[in-house]
Structures are given as structure tokens and as C-alpha cells.
Amino acid sequence: MKKYIHLVILAILIISTFSASSIKINSNQCIIAENENKKLDYNDAFIKFLIEGLTEIVEYNETGIMKKTYMVPMRDGINLATDVYLPLFLRKPQGTIFLRTPYDKDDLYELGVLLALAGYPSVIQDIRGTHASEGVFSGYRKCQTDGPDALKWIASRDWSNGKIATVGPSALGITQYLTAGSNPPELACQGIMVASTNLHKHAVYQGGQFRKQLVEKWLESVDASYLLEEIFLQENYTLDFWTNVSIEDNWENINVPAIHMGGWYDIFLQGITDGFNGYQHLSGSGALGKSKLVIGPWTHEGYIRHKQGELLYPENSRRVVDLVLMFLEMVNYYTNDEDYDFENRPAVMYYVMGDVEVIDAPGNEWRYADDWPIQADFASWYFHENDILSKNDPSNYDPTSYNYDPTNPVPTLGGQNLEMPPGPYDQRPIENRDDVLIFTSEIFTEPYEATGEIKARLFVSSDCPDTDFTVKISDVYPDGRSMLITDGILRMRNRNGVDHWEFMEPGEIYEVEIDLWSTSYIWNTGHRIRVAISSSNYPRFLANPNTKDPIYDNSTYNIANNTIYIGDEYPSCIILPEIEQGQISNPPIKPKTPTGFRRIKVDRYYKYKSTTTDPDNDRIYLLFDWGDGSSSGWLGPYNSGEKINAIHNWSQNGTYLIKTKAKDVNGTISDWSDTIKIIVPRERNIINRPYFRFFKIFPLINNLLKKLFY
């Protein structure tokens, strides 16, 4: 009898090992899934991002590290509060990971612990004038000196090998750019996320207009609203005021490689692409050609979730673990001289967005390139009469005018926002206003892709000395939704430069260019392109009062009559970076039926596999349809014949049919595979049945039984 009892216990232990393994797979990802629809602070998003990635390689254990706080002196005598986290058994000096934050270093405690547990001495510092640090917060104006001073101090410690990596998003990324601009010799590499290289251009006065919601709410959040007055007094770009918060006049001082990570709906999208191009092509020899660019379908904090705005993107849109491991690979290569293949990774990794309603629609996939922007054919889509958008040459049309009243501006609805809902939102609620002009293309009979920089060329006039013009581009779904893709603005007094003003003459026609930054998007068959033109987007941008006054001194307003000129003489248009669709090819072979667990539990992640071959030996993408209305998105590209894995969890009991489909890199699609049936049975609580009560006197066995049967 004892022999059988021992065998039963052994079987329970073996089975529980597999069960615990499946729980570990889902533990990190379920935390994020539970918060998918909750408002997420951008600092919290970064914390969750690194924690999810780091817990793939280490288990959280505060007893495995040592922490000490120092007051580190800067060159002017101000001391900055700095926490140092060290591995408990550090055998030799190591490369260090350094973070500087205005959001309180104590909030990053878990990150310091996990980085130290992973073997990296980690240092987290409150920037000048915030939280435990001395001094007065002046925005980021001291970062070009405080950052290098802190690096020098770190390199002097006996646990540091003198090579330091930095990491962080938003404010933590801006400090990295400004630190690198001083060319500190201790800096080895950087992980810069959703940040700006030029605060005037990207953060404060985009297109010359004040980014009201972003600037005012952010300054309020860090108790620095006192900075608003001097910001208003410095509307135009001057070296005296703005050079300390920009690195665009000293790219040659940059001498370190970096990962630049951004999102198509991020407030600093253009800052990240400008940063990559500056490091990659204009920098010193230590950085030239060594940077990486990653752009996902994300908002400022959306890189840890699938839902952006009102759209739910496939599972492949989240690359948290991959990106954290990519950063650590860079750190090991450049700070610890370990043999990694980081330099041979593709320079650019970007997500092509597409129709999220059709499960196998083109787009919603990652692509790779050697540089940014990728090569494209720039196509002019002209504004025609009757609200038509077309690539056909325009004829002779009458201009269209509207009244813009700054006391009744067009309300912001989605977009590259902070402190208000960001991302793709349906624009129909504001497209029927009298001060919004709409131009819509015909329905596409085949997919159409635009990847790269987008500009609008407008011919305009006004009866006021100054006004704004805004341009939005959206995807009109078959059901009528007009989902925002990107947008831009131009303050007319800054049309010829942000360093001076040129006012308008009433009735004079001006040709202007409006920068909509960049995107990568495929309009699916049955969809249409729409462009909306107006003169306000409030409160994302300050509503222009249509006067000559500076922002700080303005006390009145005018209602402007603004005119858009279209036709052969004034060919107003939007210019899209058109990408030719792939060449004709043979479709991949129908994929093999997916394999994996058939009887599973709710809210646990399970792995499934499939494979296929391509008759032309093209690289392939594979898509898993999970049978619950969601998909993996297109995974790849992979080599023909390579086994492809995907994981998923189901949130409700029931029966699901999983199938896969493949496409080659030219977009030619295979048939669906045969299905595999997955059963998620109702959970039964049988632990309290009489023959299980005996095991309650053995806590270990009782816990194992709970994992298996409850």
C-alpha cells in the first residue's frame, strides 16, 4: 500500500511541475491583461514594462541585493539624491544601468532590485529640484551638466567598470538625450523610449503652436507650473533659451549607440525618429551607424497593452519581453564586452498598422529595414470639389471658406496626446462641424499602404493677421467609422520658421506645408482615406485668437474667415509615402494543423505550434486564429519550414477551434489550416470532497492538489 501511495505522490509532484510551469508563463502577462482597459500612468507603464521583461530571467527577492542612498555632488555644489542597488555577491566591477527621473526614485524601487538581481549594479537618481534632491527644478535645463556629473561619480565607484548604460521613457528619455549631447566618456549605450531631442519643436511648440494640454498638465503634475511664464515669453526658438533642451545643434557630440523606441500615436513620435536619424547619420564615430529604431502602434504608455484608443490590436503588437531582452543584450555588449550579436540586428523594426476587424487583413505585422524612412514613392492626393480626395489631377474649382471662432474650437478627439485620451478615435462626432472640411477617397478595391513621413501642401488665406491650419488623416471603415491615424498643425506666423514671426496680409494666398509626422498604415479593401482640414484642435493645442499678440499678452480674439484653395492653379493636397505591394508569387502551402494542449484552464497561457513551407522559398508570416474573436496577428517573418510558436489564454469556459493561415513577404496568402478543438471546461471544486480531506494534514500535498483540481 505504501508503494502505491509513494507513486501517487510522485505523480502529483511531476504533474504539478508542469502545472507550475504553465502558471509562470502567464503570471506576468495576465497582470497586464487585467489592466488592459484601465487608465495607466506613463511612469507606471515603464515600471510594468521592465518588471515583465526582467521577471523572465530573475525572481524578485529583496534579500538578494544591497541598497544605499547617496547625495551626489554636482559641479555647482547641488547634491542629488541617488539610490544604488548592488547584487549581493558582486565578484568584480560590472557595467552599470543608470536612470534619472523627476517622478521620485522611490517609485522605481522594484526596478532597482530586479536589475541588481540580474547582475547589474543599478543607480536611480532624482533629478535636480525634485523629491529628495536639492536645487530648483528648471525643466531639463541642467541635464546637460548634471547627467555627465552623475556618470563621472558612478564610474569612480569600486563596483563600476566605468561603462554605464542609461534607460527610460519620456522624461527619463529626454534626460538621456541631453546627457549624451555633452559626450560624457563614461556613457556606453542608451535605451531611449518615447522621448524628444528638441523640446521646443516636439513638446512645447509643435508647428509653432503651444501644446496646451501636454505642457500645462505635465508641469502641474511635477509642481512646476511656475515655468509657464518663461515658456510663454520664449515662443520663438532662440539658442539662448532653448539650446539647453535640444541636441539638434550638436549631433557630432553624440558618441554612443542607442535603442530609440516610440509609437505611432506617441506625443514624441517625431522626437524618436529624429533621434534615431541624428545618432545614425550625423553623430560622432562612436554612434554612427550603431543605433536601432523600434516603432509600434502605441500611445505614450501603450507599449504594454494591445488596446490603443478605441482599437484593439492583435497580440503581436506587444513585444515587452523581446524588447527588454534586446536592451539587456545591448548593455552586455557595450558595458561588459560580452559576445552578443546586437550590432547585426536590423537597424529598424516597425509595426505596420491595418484593419483590426478583419482577422487576416494585410498589415498588423512587424517589418524590418536598414534605415528610416524606408524608400517610398510620394503620391499627391488632391482635394477636389464635392469633398473628393483623389490622385487625379484637379480641375478649376472654387475655393472653400469657413469661419473659425476661437471661443468654439474643434475639440480634440484622440491623437498623439498626453493627459487626455490618446490614440485612434472615431472622428465622426467632429467631422460634421461647419469649420471642418472633409475630403474622402473612393472605396479601395485593393489594399493601399503608406509608410513614412506625411505632409500636407495647402494654399490658404485669411482675413486675420494670424491663424492656424490643422490637417488630420483617417481610415474610413466600411461601417462608416473614421479612425484617426495622424495629424498636424501650423501656426501661420511661424510658417517660414519657428525663430521669427511673419504675419498674414488679408486676402493674400500663401502656400504652406503642414507636417503630420509619420505613420505606417495599410487601408484594407473596402476602406477609404479621409482628410479633415480645420483651424483648431483644442485643448491639445492652444486655440489661436487670430491676433498679432504674443500668447502671454493676448487679451482679445477675432473670428477668422479662413479659405482653402483647390484646383489646378492651387493644387492643395496631402502627400503620402506610397509603398508598392509585393510582387506576384505562389502562396505558401496550407499550414499544418496547430498542436498543443487540447484541454486547458481559464486565464492560463498555453503554447501552440504550426509550420508551413513556401514553394518559392520566400520568408513567411503565420497567423493563429484563437477561435474567441482574437488572433496572434501576423507573426514573423520566418524561414520556410520553420516551426512557429504562439501563446494564448482564454478568459471564458467553452469550446474553441484554433486554425492558422500563412502569407509570404509579398502578401500572398495560403488557405486556412485544419482546426484543433480546445476545451475549457467549467472549473469544479472537488477539494472538499471526503477523500481529499485526508490530505489537509499534509500542507504541501494539499497545495498541489488545489493547483491541479481547483
Image: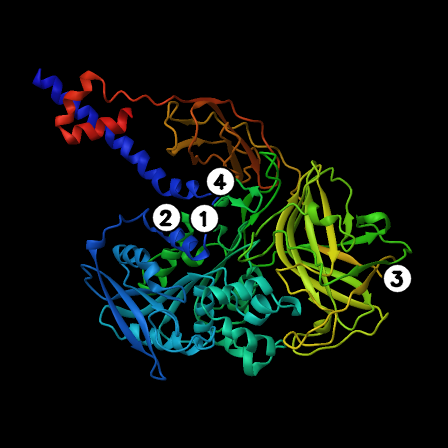
| Quadrant holding the C terminus | top left
Name the foreground residue: 155 vs 375: 155
In depth, the one of 468 and 175 nearer the eye is 468
Task: State which tag comes first along the sequence, 4 or 2.
Answer: 2
Asked which secondary structure carries label 1, the reply is helix
Expressed as whole percent of the image width and height from the top left, the position of residue 296 reads 53, 51
Amino acid on which disc 3 is placed: Glu
Q: Nearer the viewer, mark 3 or mark 1?
A: 1
Q: Residues within 10 Å of mark 4 (few under 14, many from 20)?
A: many
Which residue is label 2 attached to? 52
On the image, the x and y values in percent for residue 655 come to: 45, 21
Please tell me which residue lies in front, 12 or 62: 62
The numbered mark at residue 569 is 3
Name the amino acid type tagged 4: Glu
In x, y percent, where is residue 627? Answer: 50, 27
| Residue matched to label 4 | 315
Calculate the distance from the C-alpha at mark 1 to the C-alpha at mark 2: 9 Å
| Residue assigned mark 1 | 304
**With 432 as the anchor, is 343 left or right in this view?**
left
